[in-house]
Image: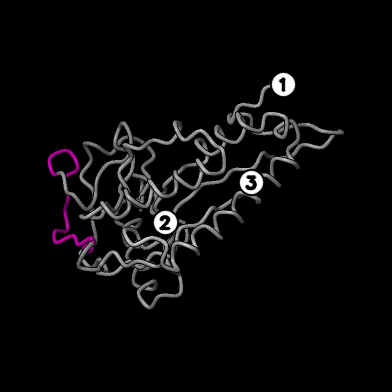
Amino acid sequence: MDTSINQEFIVNSGEARAWPHSRIGRFCNLEDRNINYWNSYLNNLGRLNRGKGSAMAIGSVHMTYVNANEIGKMLSIKYSKVYESSHKAFNLHRKLAKSFINYAQSKQNGDMVQTPFGPIDLSDDQECSAKINTEYWNYANVRRSDMDAVGKGATSLAIFPYDHDVFEQELEDVAHFLKNEGLNTKYIDRARQPHLVIFKGIQSISSIRMLVPDNQPTELPLDPPVILTS
């Protein structure tokens, strides 16, 4: 039976059910006072670049440590028998998510000093905010450390924290958790720089002049890392 992560559906007793997808990352704190400002900013970003792509909803903006493809590979390889049933696969993903909650809480309680594993604010002096001081940003000629292309073809805009060491260390601790769960962490892309995608283009935007609102909020609080399963 094909248990690759690219398999989207399984037919069991005449019923089709999607395979589970999980990813580990940090999402924005939607209860923070600045979220309304970010909603307005992203709406303006999408409006100014209509026809080039779409801005992300603030509830979908997140920093990924381990994506769904990587987690799927690790779990399906170790638990190939479980992946013969989508129902059992869902339970496996949920079990991993619960284990990670306990792990993350233990880190917040003082077991780890190098990374917070708790709420963090990108406007903190150690991280720095992602300010854009110019209305026009030519993607082909200007490379900024706080916003950059994601992947080949430069199809997205993303916020890159200036000081990303804390997030890279946190990724190592996430990998440590997965290794303790008996998973092969070689599938994790350690070279992926932490970032938060805020705009997805419908095609390459490398040579397109993007319009960037000049009223970007100076704070972007992130919730503690979680495993999100769908």
Q: Which residue is mark 1?
A: 1
Q: Which quarter shows the N terminus?
A: top right
Q: Which residue is mark 3?
A: 93
Given this view, does label 2 or label 1 mark the residue nearer the observer?
A: 1
CA–CA distance between discs 2 and 3?
Answer: 22 Å
Q: Residue furthest top?
A: 1
Q: Is 144 within the magenta?
A: no
Nearer to us in this view, 198 or 27: 27
Given this view, does label 2 or label 3 mark the residue nearer the observer?
A: 3
What's the residue type where badge 2 is placed?
A: Val
200 with respect to 96 (left or right): left
Q: Secondary structure at mark 2?
A: loop
Q: Position of residue 5 (x, y in %)?
A: 59, 31
Q: Earlier in the sequence, mark 2 or mark 1?
A: 1
Give the colour scheme of this rendering: one colour
Residue 192 against residue 168 in the figure, above or below: above
Q: Which residue is mark 2?
A: 61
